[in-house]
Amino acid sequence: MHYLIAGAGPAAIAAAERLRKLDSDGEITLIGAQPQPPYSRMAIPYFLTGKVGEDGTYLRRSSDHYKDQRIELVRGEVVCVDASAHQVTLADGQQFNYDKLLLATGAEPIIPPVPGMDDPRVQQCWHLEDAKKIIELAKPGARAVQVGAGFIGCIILESWVLREVDLTVVEMGPRMVPRMLGDKAGSLLRSWCESKGVTVHTSVRVKAIESSTQELQVILDNGETCLADVVIVSTGVKPRVAYLAGSDITIDQGIVVDEHMQTSAPDVYAAGDCAQGLDFSTGQTAVHAVQPTATEHGRVAAANMAGENNSPYKGSLNMNVLDTLGLVTCSFGAWEGVEGGDSAEMYNPDNYQYINLQFKDDVLVGANSVGYHSHLGVLRGLIETQIPLGSWKARLQANPISLADAYVGVNQAALQKR
C-alpha cells in the first residue's frame, strides 16, 4: 500500500506517523513545498524574537526522525491531482502514483489588492524565509506597520514589540480579532496593546503603500498616513486548493470531507487548514484553521486510510486561545450565541477582565473571555461534553467565573444518577 501525503505541516505529520503505527509495511511519501524539514508556523514568532533558533520551529527535533519512521520526504509542490488515475503531478514535472492520497496542503495568506504591495520592504510572515527578511528589516527603533489584527496578526504582534520597533497596527474590522472576540473583549485587547505602546487603528483600510528610498508611506482610507521602514501584511488566510481546479474533488470553503475525512473522490482524503470538516458546535462543516484541529484531522484521516472505517470524526470545536503581550483571550464554540439562547457576562475593564457565557437551554455552548487562564480546560470540557447544567446554569449566570465549581458539580450529579 502506497500512502501519498501532499503537505508537510502538522496535519500531514500526524497522519504519516499514525499511518506508520497502523501499517508497518506500507510505503509513506510526504511531499513538502518548503526547503526546511517540516516546521510549525506557530513557532515563527519565537524565531523572530530569538527565543528559538530555526531548528526550534521544526515539528520533530531529531534529524533522523522521518528516516527512522520510514517516511520518505520529497521536496516539491503539488500542482495537479488526477484522482481517476490515482496520480499527482508536482511543479517540476515529477509524477507520483498512490493507493491512498491525503491532501494536507494547508492554507495560504490573503494578499489585499493594494498598490505598493510589491515593494521588498512589504513582507508577509508566513514562511521561515519571510521571518528572516523581517529580522533584517525590523531592527530596534524601526517604524513598522502591521496590516491586519486577526488571530495570526495578534500572535506575531508580540514579536515586533519585543524587537523594540515602533509599531502601528491597522485593522479593517471594527475591533481586533473580530472573528474571535466580541466588542467588549476586542476593546479590552486594543486598550491592552495601546498600554504597551502599540498604536492601533480599527475600521480602517490601507488604500495604498507609496515608497521612496528613505521610507514607506502607508496611506489609510481615513486620510491618515503612517510612515514605515517595514510593512508586515497579516490579513488572513484561505485554504490552498487552487491546484484542484478542474478535478472531481468537491470544493466549498475548503476541500469538503465526510466523517471519515474522505473527499468526493475515491481513495482521496483531506485534513488540516485546507479541509472543510464537521463543526462540533453547529453540526455543519467548516474550515477551522488551528493546529489542534489539523493534528486531529490528520490522525483520523490516517486511521481511515489504513482501513479502520470505524473511526469517524466527531467534529472540531471552534476554539481559539491567544496570548497577546501577556493578555490571554479566548473563544470557544458558539461564542456569539444561538437563537433563543441565554447568556451571562462579567466585565471588569480596569483589570482587563471579561467573560461571556452562551447557553442553549441548560447546556453551555460557547464562551468569550479576556484575562483568565485557569478556566480554559473547564470551558472546553463543559462545551464538548454538552452536559446539562441543571441548577448550575443559574449559578453561572449569577457568577460566570465559578466555572470550576460548576464543572465539579454537574459531573458529580451525573455520576450519582448512574
Image (cartoon, rainbow, N blue to C red):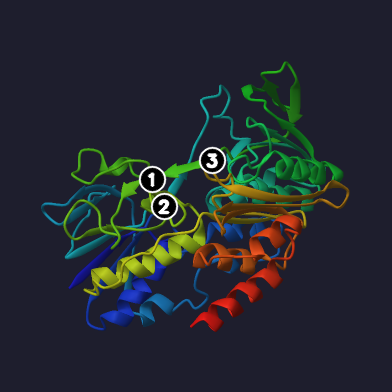
From the image, tell me which residue sits under label 2. Answer: 106
Which residue corresponds to the image point at 27% horizontal and 59% vertical from the top-left? 269
Q: Are marks 2 and 1 in contact (CB under 8 Å)?
A: yes
Left or right: 119 with respect to 311?
Answer: right
Q: Are marks 1 and 3 in contact (CB under 8 Å)?
A: no
Crowdedness near tag 1: few (<14), some (14–19) or many (≥20) residues, C-alpha within 10 Å: some
Q: CA distance from mark 3 to mark 2?
A: 13 Å
Badge 2 or badge 1: first in the primary sequence:
2
Q: Amino acid at mark 1?
A: Arg
- In the rendered image, residue 276, in percent from the top left (x then y), is placed at 37, 50
Q: Quadrant of the N terminus?
A: bottom left
Residue 122 visible? The answer is: yes
Left or right: 322 with respect to 224?
Answer: left
Provide the secondary structure element on which disc 2 rests. loop
Furthest residue toward top:
223
From the image, tell me which residue sits under label 3. Answer: 236
Which residue corresponds to the image point at 22% horizontal and 82% vertical from the top-left? 25
Q: Amino acid at mark 2?
A: Gly
Q: CA distance from mark 2 to mark 1?
A: 6 Å
The quadrant where residue 117 appears? top right
Q: Which one is nearer the viewer's eye here, 301 or 318?
A: 318
